[in-house]
Image: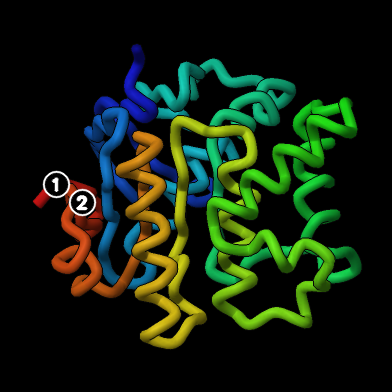
Amino acid sequence: MNNPISFSEAGIVNGETLVVYGLNMEVHPSDMVYIVGKVGTGKTSIIRTITGENPLLHGEGQVCGYNLRTLHEKDIPYLRRRMGVVFQDFQLLMDRSVHDNLEFALNCTGWKDRHKTNERIMEALESVGMATKAHKMPHQLSGGEQQRVAIARAILNEPELIIADEPTGNLDEETSEEILKLLQKINREKGTAIVMVTHNRSICRRYPGRVFETRNETCTEI
């Protein structure tokens, strides 16, 4: 089985500017990996490269079986089906219910059978403790509940990799702990590799994993 992420001497760009030189990173199945560093040191650019949003122009990189150097635009949706992404600002569709947010995500990734779609939605919501909120609109939910829905959306296709970009950045301390415990549970029980960007280094101590730090145009394991 291929590793979910493999970079070798990769140059990470932001626009046309190289922001991280010589990235070497192997993320194995079941890994919990953190990327830490100051604002503007390339953390988000690495994430955008992993999701296919930024091209890989230098070095080698593979994500979920796709070669990033030869990745065509038409392949990007298929790459993203094999990973889940959790954002700081949740990115839910505010004009539709929790159920319909997840249904939209499944429809976008090729699910057609309505019965199987509904079944999978309820399984995902159950696993994040939100099964009773399927009918609610996002504005009727707390920040923590919205992030739980976002995590449910990320695991719909049972991905081998979850990218979490500052997933607790907009949450209070107690709610943050709940979200971190939920991600840890998914990592341990499902064997899903998780790569989390965070500025909060205490998270890395409380929920141990491998830590990469961006600084001085590099990203290295510490």
Which residue lies at the image location 63% right of the left edge and 40% below the top edge? 156
> In the displayed structure, does residue 33 sit left or right of residue 5?
left
Mark 2 or mark 1, earlier in chain: 2
- Using the image, determine if residue 220 lies above or below residue 106: below
Q: Quadrant of residue 114?
A: top right
Residue 17 in view (yes/no): no
Identified at 33% across, 22% down, the residue is 3
Q: Residues within 10 Å of mark 1 (few under 14, many from 20)?
A: few
Question: Circle 2 — which element?
Answer: strand
In the image, taking residue 182 as reference, residue 73 lies left or right, namely right
**Residue 96, image x, y percentages:** 88, 64
Residue pointed to by mark 1: 221
Q: Quadrant of residue 26?
A: top left
Rendered position, 194 above or below 88: above
Pick the front one: 127 or 147: 127
| Above or below 89: residue 9 | above
Q: Are marks 2 and 1 in contact (CB under 8 Å)?
A: yes
Q: Which mark is residue 212?
A: 2
Label annotation for residue 106: none
The amino acid at mark 1 is Glu
Query: Residue farthest to the left?
Result: 222
| Picture coordinates of residue 43, whole percent (x, y) | 37, 57
What residue is at 28 percent from the left and 74 percent from the top?
200
Q: Amino acid at mark 2?
A: Phe
Whether residue 173 is visible: yes
Where is residue 40 shown, x and y percent of the image? 38, 67
* 165 displayed left or right of 133: left
Q: CA distance from mark 2 to mark 1?
A: 4 Å
